[in-house]
Amino acid sequence: MSYTPISRAAMEEGYTSIPTSHSVGSVPAAVVEESQAPKTNLQVFPPGNSGSSYQAPGVPYGEDIQTTNTWSGYFNISSYQPYFNVDTDIVFDRLIYAVYPMGGFYMKIDSNPDMYGPVWISTTLVFILSALGNCAAYLMSNGSKTDTAWNFDVNYVNWAACAIYGYLLSVPAAFYFLLRYFGSNAGLVKLWCLWGYSLFLFIPTALLLVIPVEILRWIIILFAGTASAYFIGLNLKPYTNGQHDLFLWILCASVLQFLLAIFIKVFFFA
C-alpha cells in the first residue's frame, strides 16, 4: 500500500473548512458586540462604583439595594458602603497628613469622607492603650523596685473603649449641631472622619510612652497633644465661614483634643 504525504498547508485548509458549529463536541463561541460588552475599570474601587469617586448613602449600587429615604435603608449595610470606598493609597495619604498637622486635610475628605480610617484607627488605639498601659505600669513598678506584686489590669480595655469610642462619636456630633446652628455647611461624616484621623498620632505616641522615664513621657504627650489639637483647629477653621463667634468654639475643640492627650497620659501611663 502506497503512502501519499500531505502538506501542512493542505492540512490547515482542511481543518479550517470544517464548520465548527457542526463538529462533534464543539461549543459555539459567544460573540458579544462591542457596544454590549460591559466596560470595567480596575483602577476604580469598588468596581460597582465606576461612575464617580464617591456616592452618598441613598444612591443604590444595584436594584436590590434599599435607599436611605426609608427607615429600612438606615438599617441596611449597603447604605453605608460608600463611606468605605477607599483603598490603601488613599488611607495612607490621609494618615501622612494626620501625622504632619498641616492645612488642606479638610479638602482631601471634602468629596469622599471615609469611615474606614476612623474605625480602624480608634480600634487600634483601644488595644494599643490597654496593652501598652499595662506594659508601662510593669516597667515603672519594676524600675522602682517595690515589693508590690504587679497584676495585669484587664479593665484597661473597657476604659480605653469607652474613652476613645465615646470621644470619637460624641464630640464631632456635638460640633456638627453647633456648626449647623451657626449656618455652617459642615457634614457629620466629614467631622467624624476628621476627628478619627486626628487620633492616629496617639498610636505612635503610645509606643513611646512605654519608656520608663516620667519627664520624657510628659514631653512626648505634650508635643503629641499640641500637634493633634493644632490639626483639629486648623482643619475646622474653614467651616467657620469667617464668623468670629465660631473661633471660640474652634478653640474649645482644640482644647478638648489636648485634654484627651493628657487623659491618655494620666490614666494609662501614670
Image (spheres, grey):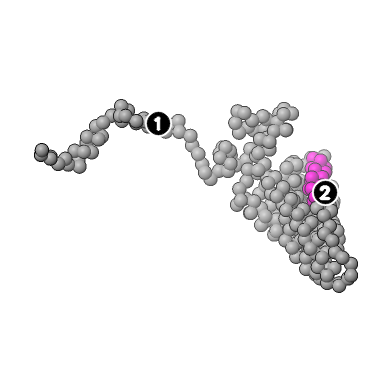
Q: Quadrant of residue 20?
A: top left
For the question of whether residue 175 can be seen, the reply is: no
Q: Quick one: 264 or 261, which is closer to the camera?
A: 264
Amino acid at circle 2: Cys
N-terminal of the two: label 1 or label 2? 1
Query: Badge 2 local density, few (<14 within 10 Å), some, or many (20+)?
Result: few
Q: Residue at x 60, y 28 (%)?
A: 63
Q: Quick one: 151 or 262, which is closer to the camera?
A: 151
Boundaries of the magenta span: 160-180
Q: Residue at x 30, y 29 (%)?
A: 23
Horizontal relation, residue 98 to residue 249: left or right: left
Q: Position of residue 249 (x, y in %)?
A: 84, 49
**Quarter of the picture holding the N terminus:** top left
Q: Quick one: 138 or 92, which is closer to the camera?
A: 138
Q: Is 187 contained in the magenta span? A: no
Q: Residue at x 45, y 30 (%)?
A: 36
Label 2, secondary structure: give it: helix
Prevailing secondary structure of the magenta residues: helix
Q: Which residue is mark 2?
A: 162
Q: Which mark is residue 30?
A: 1
